[in-house]
Image (tube, grey):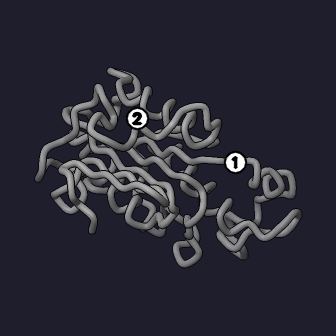
């Protein structure tokens, strides 16, 4: 598993792209291959990629900016489970809707986006109320010691207040929580599928 906050969230997403474009031991992944940043990947870094089982990006940087992402054309996350979260008051350190835009670029079968009400960029230091969701994500999709009920169903993400429609960072101004798996999809408000 791999997770990080802010720029660490960006790095986690980059590791997700490295994981999903992995081409074998001692072979540079497609993502960052031939870039200045990719030149610094050594075989130890490359060979550990298959051991990473999930990505958490907590209030991440916007990955569609060339100065944040060294290889946008090969930035592909289409296999590894991903959980991206933010808060509707996170508008001054990272650009508004950065997390949603990052989530829209992820096509993994298991992926989640969450915009929590009244939480800013420093939520991990100030309230830590998003942490249980991250722990449940790892327990469910990495360790497989929990079922998916924390994420799907009438009590999804119990204990967290989602941002309302139109709040800063809600996806397309409409959705503050969406979860996808091969067998289940949920959103808040319910019924969002775009």
The answer to whether residue 106 is above or below residue 111 is: below
Nearest the camera: 112 or 59?
A: 112
For image coordinates 29% across by 34% down, the residue present is 155
In this picture, residue 44 sits left or right of residue 110: right
> Element type at marker 2?
helix
Tell me residue 62's x, y (percent): 40, 58
Residue beneath disc 2? 150
In this picture, residue 42 sits left or right of residue 108: right
How many angstroms separate mark 1 from mark 2 (CA)?
Answer: 22 Å
In this picture, residue 79 sits left or right of residue 115: right
The answer to which image quadrant residue 192 occupies is: bottom left
Nearest the camera: 117 or 121?
A: 117
Tell me residue 156's x, y (percent): 32, 37
Residue beneath disc 1? 52
Nearest the camera: 99 or 106?
A: 106
Callout 1–callout 2 Cβ contact below 8 Å: no
Tell me residue 59's x, y (percent): 39, 43
For image coordinates 66% across by 47% down, the residue present is 53
Q: Residues within 10 Å of mark 1 (few under 14, many from 20)?
A: some
Q: Residues within 10 Å of mark 2 (few under 14, many from 20)?
A: some
Tell me residue 99's x, y (percent): 36, 53
Query: Which quarter shows the N terminus?
Result: top right
Q: Mark 1 or mark 2, which has the lower sequence index?
A: 1
The answer to which image quadrant residue 20 occupies is: bottom right
For image coordinates 39% across by 41% down, the residue present is 151
């Amino acid at each position: 598993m791999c997770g990080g906050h802010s720029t660490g969230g960006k790095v986690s997403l980059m590791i997700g792209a490295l994981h999903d474009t992995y081409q074998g031991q001692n072979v540079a992944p497609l993502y960052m291959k031939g870039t200045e940043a990719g030149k610094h990947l050594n075989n130890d870094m490359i060979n550990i990629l298959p051991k990473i089982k999930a990505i958490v990006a907590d209030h991440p940087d916007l990955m569609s900016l060339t100065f944040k992402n060294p290889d946008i054309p090969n930035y592909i996350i289409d296999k590894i489970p991903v959980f991206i979260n933010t808060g509707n008051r996170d508008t001054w350190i990272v650009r508004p809707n950065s997390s949603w835009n990052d989530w829209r670029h992820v096509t993994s079968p298991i992926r989640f986006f969450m915009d929590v009400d009244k939480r800013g960029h420093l939520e991990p230091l100030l309230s830590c109320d998003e942490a249980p969701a991250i722990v449940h994500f790892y327990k469910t999709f990495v360790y497989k010691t929990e079922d998916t009920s924390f994420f799907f169903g009438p009590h999804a993400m119990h204990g967290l207040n989602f941002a309302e429609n139109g709040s800063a960072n809600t996806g397309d101004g409409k959705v503050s929580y969406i979860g996808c798996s091969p067998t289940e999809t949920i959103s808040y408000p319910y019924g969002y599928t775009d």
